[in-house]
Image (cartoon, rainbow, N blue to C red):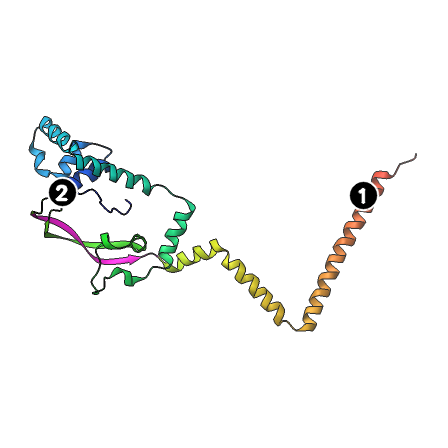
Amino acid sequence: MAPDPMRVRVTIAEDVFCRAFVSNGGDRVKALLKAYPHTETWSQPKQITRANAIMQTARVALRIQELIKLTEREFVVDRSRVLQEQASLAFFDPLELFDERGSFRPLAEMPPRVRAAIKSIEVEHVIRTVADPVTGEKVDTIVSVPVKLAFHSKTAALDALMKHLGMYEMDNAQRNAMQWRNMPRDARQKLLGALKERVGGERSGATDMGEESASGRGGRVTH
């Protein structure tokens, strides 16, 4: 999913519910079970009633709409976005992975162009006590801590950008011009002479064929 600024504030469990609801195609009971595992032992009518109640919460409804818009934006692809992604890979600076104190930034705090350069992440799951953003209560939650990162190839990204900008063609043209300028004068004269003879020969051949064809069309056979 696209970078999520989470402008609508919901509880941790509510956010899990919203994300599950959007990703599973709108099944609110499955979202309930994902966010509140203890409800698995409830009867189905009770689960439906609880899921409906959560859906009717204003902040949950707004959060779901926010996530839907982010998902839609993610699948909009145009020329400028492709070039922007290639540029993110080509000009990625590893220094942006760290804050001013030299500590590794959480993924949520990294600029999108930095996250785009990350090819894969190995994580360890640990339990940490955090404050709920809405209630302020301390809750234990499982967080993922990156332990190993791999990045997309800068060389491949630069190569793709150079092809798009026609820089290889310009370089070849400049190289050919440089070779011509560095060629000795007599060698250039011989090359020009050979080219003139070849062009002249091709023109003469074309003229002869044209005359022969005209003669063939205008002749008349007499018996």
On screen, residue 30 above or below 74: above
Q: 26 or 214: which is nearer to us?
A: 26
User: In terms of depth relative to the viewer, which is nearer, 196 or 208?
Assistant: 196
Label 1 environment density (alpha carbons within 10 Å; few <14, some 14–19, many ≥20): few
Instruction: Measuring from the top left, give residue 129's x and y in whole percent.
Output: 9, 52
x and y percentages locating residue 27 in the rendered image: 20, 32
Q: Main secondary structure of the magenta part?
A: strand
- At a point 30% along the width and 52% down the height, the residue shown is 112
Residue sitting at the far top: 45
Residue to which mark 2 is pinned? 11
- Magenta stretch: includes residue 214: no
| Label 1 element class | helix
The residue singled out by tag 1 in the image is 213
| Dot 1 or dot 2, earlier in sequence | 2
Q: Residues within 10 Å of mark 2 (few under 14, many from 20)?
A: some
Q: Which residues are magenta?
A: 138-152
Q: Nearer the viewer, mark 1 or mark 2?
A: 2
For the point 60% across and 68% down, the residue is: 179
Identity, as a three-letter code, of the amino acid under mark 2: Thr
Marks 1 & 2, CB-CB < 8 Å contact:
no
Q: For residue 60, which numbered disc appears in the image?
A: none
What whole-number distance in Å separates the C-alpha atoms at marks 1 and 2? 89 Å
Q: Position of residue 151 (x, y in %)?
A: 31, 57
Q: At 29% across and 62% down in the image, what residue appears?
A: 94
Could you say where residue 124 lies in the image, as x and y percent from the top left? 17, 54
Q: Residue at x 20, y 62 (%)?
A: 103
Secondary structure of the residue carrying numbered label 2 = loop
